[in-house]
Amino acid sequence: MAIPTFVDQVTLHVYGGNGGHGCVSIHREKFKPLGGPDGGNGGDGGSVILRVDHRLTTLVDYHRQAHRRATNGEPGRGNHANGARGEDVILPVPPGTVVSDADTGELIADLTGDGAEIVVAQGGRGGLGNAALASPNRKAPGFALLGEKGQTRTINLELKVVADIGLVGFPSAGKSSLVAAISRARPKIADYPFTTLVPNLGVVVAGDTSFTVADVPGLIEGASEGRGLGFDFLRHIERCAAIVHVIDCATYLPGRDPVTDLDVIEAELKAHGGLEDRPRLVALNKIDIPDARQVAEMASGDLHDRGLQIFPISTRSGEGLRELIFAMAQLVKARRDSVPPPPPTRIIIRPKPLDSQAEFSVEREGELWRVRGDKPERWVQQTDFANAEAVGYLADRLNRIGIEDRLLELGAQPGDGVAIGGANAVIFDFAPQMEIGAEILSRRGEDQRLSEARPAARRRRERDRAYHSADEAAEDQPADDDA
């Protein structure tokens, strides 16, 4: 099965890289076996980034490769060596790409300017090593923080061609021929009736004004209701400053004439919506054919009465194209002059609220107390629950922002279940500090080897003092004359 050359809608699955785990390490060297913690931090995971590339015109690169994953950060190592950061994945997209969340339908970004970019899957942060966790009260932590998982999302990419002028009309009306005649674009053109399968984009220069022209292929009656291909491509003229009706004056199909064709296409544009304010021009094409010239002359009166600008043209001979081009340029220039430039970007830094309870929420759900919040959920993800010291550190962090006090205010009792997080929550048995007593007062984070080393050193010092005292006592005794 051949891969299509033009794709304007794709669903993309993106995965940010996981952060590397922090390292637990104790510095060792000769005569200094326990020189303190020196575990490095884990590296951050890479992110998935969309970036606009003006050289692209399609989303075909993601038609078959719909899963894109950034690399993970490396874990930390001893001797204060931090792990390397994961590499970002840059996904180039054409100008006019609209990004939305596939699950909620929420608009994420509308990427138009060349080089514009957005992070669609953030990489996870690396975990801190035990060197970074050391403090005066925790001189040798026997644990490190785990790296966070990268963000996983499913997004929709929808291409809306960025063009100043949109050409609309029935199949074989000459839209692609008009693009080829007034620009350097070379779309596929044939002498038999057929419809273009992809929008064609061309750059036109008229005096000191340059603008882009795009055609909308396959527009027929009922396109707004899903007939034919026009419904799929109507989105490509939503950004246009003006619309040009290209009408075939040489058709011999029954029920077809310039006025009727114009009414049918206008009805489809109205049904699509959002294009009522665009100015219109009418190009009566194929006047190089004698019968078509007569049809154009007869239809011009009715169209003029509607207040439309009429341009009889021939894409084959070039007749009337210069007048049409400069009329297009005038509309584009007027539109550009009427749209004010965007205001300069102002960066506003707002301090975070001092209320600690704003960082989390606590609700009663049946038999459980549910705690939600960015910080507590992130801290749970960073905790190695196989390490009792790491669990104690997590308890200290949760207490520091007031979760325990909030639970007590709401009436939580010792032994109640407390779930932190959503679907994959971690559940604890509530145990307030007052219940723990001496365990809370003990110093967390002491390396057990250091604790064992202190009594041994103390015994050696006491033994040395005992020997020294014995020697001094022996020297103070009087000598035995009978010896």
Image (cartoon, rainbow, N blue to C red):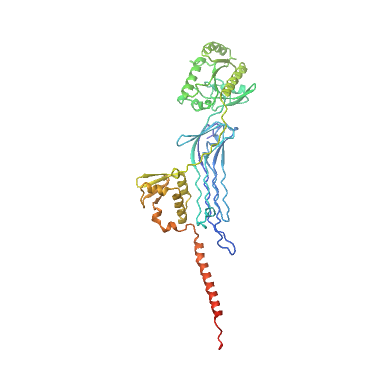
Residue at x 49% of width, y 37% of height: 155
Q: Quarter-wise, where is residue 209 in the image?
A: top right
Q: State the count of labels.
A: 0
Give the answer, above or below, for where 154 lies relative to 293.
Answer: below
Of 54 and 67, nearer the camera is 54
Q: Residue furthest right?
A: 207
Q: Looking at the picture, how far across and down is residue 253, in whole percent?
A: 50, 16
Q: Quarter-wise, where is residue 47 in the image?
A: top right
Residue at x 44% of width, y 49% of height: 398
Q: Quarter-wise, where is residue 440 in the image?
A: bottom left
Of 119 and 346, nearer the camera is 346
Q: Looking at the picture, how far across and down is residue 114, in whole percent?
A: 59, 33
Of 58 and 100, nearer the camera is 100
Residue 177 appearing in the image: no
Indicate left or right for 431 with 117 as reference. left
Quadrant including the C terminus: bottom right
Q: Residue furthest bottom?
A: 482
Of 362 and 101, nearer the camera is 362
Residue 379 appearing in the image: yes
Q: Looking at the picture, how far across and down is residue 116, in whole percent?
A: 57, 35
